[in-house]
Image (cartoon, coloured by chain):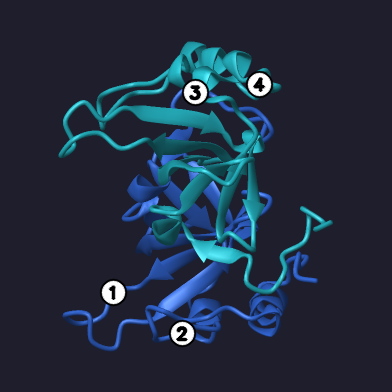
Chain colours: A cyan, B blue
């Protein structure tokens, strides 16, 4: 098992390049891609991966924020794996706007939905 | 003082938008901008901010990686402040290539130069 507190060779990646990294479920099916990472400016911690599940020519495309702790990086797949049911993802909090403004309430709602501890004050 | 383990309203930012955030010294002089963030894919921790100090039409522009812990976010400035002498920055490790490959040795060299604990194995 990888010690998550240590950087290993090849584990460092430019934020710009995380964009487009594939996300799979535990069956190995591709769910979508990471379109951006939400970072806490103060601590530098990546808090959410914002996923995109497709959409038609960008119309109707939804932004799905996933708490970072729900994603595990799988080196053999060169992508992230989430242990989440499709039905769970379909009903998950999403937003439409590219310039969406995160509020603590919204962040807590996302964390609660995925049943992970929240870091919001 | 801000608790760095908590997300506060307005502290969450998209990695894409950190690009271009100004970096100042403690005198308030602008040193440059953040051009990218190096993230550990496994832990999700931002490990380095890669700064750009200008350059002429992109020629001779150097990439300056700074350990994340050397940067403090200053809300009033909407930018990062580093407590580093210009002379220290001028002699700091840099790289030229956009597609530079980080090695543990290089990472440890950067950490050592700035006298911060290293997370590299």
* Neighbour tally class for label 1: few under 14, some 14-19, many 20 plus, Cα within 10 Å: some
Residue nearer the viewer, B67 or B15: B15
- Of all chains, the one bearing label 2 is B
**In terms of secondary structure, where does tag 1 sit?**
loop
Per the model, the C-alpha gap separating discs 2 and 1 is 14 Å
Which residue carries the number 2 mark?
B95
Q: Secondary structure at mark 3?
A: helix
The residue under the point 67% across, 54% down is B42
Foreground of the two, A84 or A29: A29
Q: Is residue B38 above or below residue A29?
A: below
Q: Would residue B118 be seen by someone viewing this image from the given angle?
A: yes
- Kindly indicate whether the residue at mark 4 contacts the one at mark 2 (C-beta within 8 angstroms): no
Q: CA distance from mark 4 to mark 1?
A: 39 Å
Q: What residue does disc 3 label?
A: A89
The residue singled out by tag 4 in the image is A118
Q: Where does residue A54 sit, x and y in percent of width and height?
A: 30, 37
At x 64% / y 34%, what residue is drawn?
A70
Q: Earlier in the sequence, mark 2 or mark 1?
A: 1
Element under label 2? loop
* Residue B4: x %, y % from top left: 66, 36
Q: Chain of mark 3?
A: A
> Badge 2: few (under 14), some or many (20 or more) residues near its Cα, within 10 Å?
some
Would you name the residue on which mark 1 appears? B54
Q: Nearer the viewer, mark 2 or mark 1?
A: 2
């Amino acid at each position: 098992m990888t010690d998550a507190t240590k950087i290993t060779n090849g584990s460092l990646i430019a934020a710009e390049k995380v964009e487009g990294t594939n996300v799979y479920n535990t069956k190995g099916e591709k769910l979508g891609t990471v379109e951006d990472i939400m970072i806490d400016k103060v601590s530098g911690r990546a808090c959410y991966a914002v996923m995109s599940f497709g959409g038609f020519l960008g119309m109707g495309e939804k932004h799905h924020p996933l708490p970072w702790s729900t994603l595990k990086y799988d080196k053999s797949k060169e992508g992230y794996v989430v242990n989440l049911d499709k039905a769970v993802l379909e009903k998950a909090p999403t937003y439409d706007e590219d310039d969406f403004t995160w509020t603590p309430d919204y962040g807590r709602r996302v964390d609660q939905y995925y049943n992970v501890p929240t870091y919001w004050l």
